[in-house]
Amino acid sequence: MRVYLLLMLVAAAVTFLTTPFARWVALKTSAISAVRARDVHLVPTPRLGGLAMLIGIVVSVMLASQMPFLSGVFSDRQAWGIVGGAAIVCGLGWADDKWDLDWVTKLAGQVLAAGFMALQGVQLITLPIAGTTITSSRTSLVITVLAVVVAMNAVNFVDGLDGLAAGIVAIGGAAFFLYTYGLTQQVSAEDYSSLASLMMAVLVGVCVGFLPYNFHPARIFMGDAGSMLIGLVMAGAAITVTGNVQPDVMTGSQALPAFIPLLLPVAVLMLPLLDMGLAVIRRLAAGKSPMAPDRMHLHHRMLALGHSHRRAVVILYVWTAVFAFSAAALVRWDWEIVLIWTAVFVVLALLATLGPLRHRGRFLDDDVALSGQTPKVPAAVGAAQPALVPQSATESATERVAVKAHVKTKETVE
């Protein structure tokens, strides 16, 4: 456990220290998010936080490769396959953040990254359902690529509020880490090393290290470079568990834990998957492309209920924790006990969701963070933009000029 916690701390520290560098690179390369009608933010913001997250992952995995405790994890190419796939999608996201790629190009890049990872051995081969084995290598490759692409897009869809995607993945990843570590203890009493535990520890670390810059009001967004990266790493870690664990390693008389390797990844990404599924159905029903943007995501609905930006994010954190930790708890406790406690926390989460506090000036209200300036969402395309929040005193004049130049360029193009 200490080794994983050390790597988590290293990943968090490296990401935290390199995020200002990523922000500087975003400004220099014009990877800046302009204010659009469907957006919640009011200030054009650099969006290359995924670069810092990638650096955190690479440094942590390189350190892990030198640790004797984890030597068995690096006996094959799977770990480097996940890192390589993360680098590919980070580069793809960087290009999209700068040039706003069309969805076909992005999908092709996602398939390339997922395929690269699969070819390095990160593939779904067995499923914990009646000992199912995927005998066809081509079928295994297709299912693996599909699962990874879905996970990347699910995280990308939910990345709509400051700190939302990073916090959701950090919370879900913590639950997944506890599950994989506990499972490793059950399977092997002498060797607790696990690729899934390693990658989840590193993933939680980079998300925690990035959050201080990304929580509302955000100074930098992770962008597609970050959302696709953490989605791919999450999927890669889940596949290494799902594709290799058989039901007979589970303890206890209940049969449900045999499905945990399938259930837990879905529970961790429950909100992103639900948001993506509803968006696709909604857009297809309206005769639009599944990739057409709108303002009907879960986070938009939370704001419509009357929640502040920060409170909406924290409540979605709570829902993620309820789903993820409930699924992970099935390995340790009987399903009846887990069900009772899950019902209790679901009720509490519902009360928090449907009964927003309407008194201003309290903890998690936006006016506290913004010194009395409450952000408003632009009403429609072409509507007059509200006054920008004053720039941080630490932000240089060069950065302000870069942001303004980028916005003027966007307006000219549009």
Image (cartoon, rainbow, N blue to C red):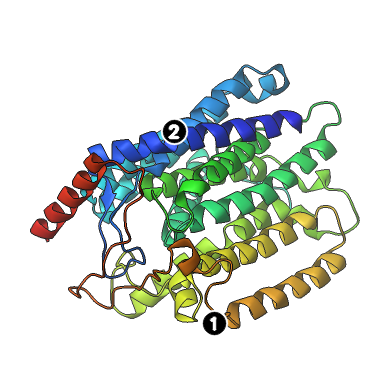
Q: In this view, does 21 lie above or below 220?
A: above
Q: Can residue 135 be seen in this view?
A: no
Residue 166 in the image: above or below residue 88:
below
Q: Where is residue 192 in the image (x, y as percent from the top left)?
A: 77, 30
Residue type for callout 1: Arg
Q: Which of 234 and 37 is in front in this view?
A: 37
- For label 2, the SS is helix
Residue at image location 10% in from the left, 57% down from the top: 413
Q: Quadrant of the C terminus?
A: bottom left
Q: Name the residue under label 2.
A: 18
Residue 160 coordinates in the image, percent (x, y): 42, 62
Q: Can residue 403 be seen in this view?
A: yes
Left/right of residue 189 with respect to residue 60 in the rendered view? right
Give the mark nearest the N terminus, 2 or 1: 2
Tell me the distance, in whole angstroms, between the alpha carbons under discs 2 and 1: 38 Å
Q: Find residue 35 and report its image quarter.
A: bottom left
Q: Which of 230 and 146 is in front in this view?
A: 230
In the picture, the quarter occupied by the N terminus is top right
Q: In this view, does 96 lie to the left or right of 146?
A: left
Is 280 left or right of 28, judged from the image as shown? Answer: right
Q: Which amino acid does label 2 sit on?
A: Thr
Discs 2/1, front: 1
The residue to which callout 1 is attached is 358
Query: Horizontal and vertical percent for residue 275?
Result: 48, 68
- The residue that appears at 51% across and 48% down in the rendered structure is 211
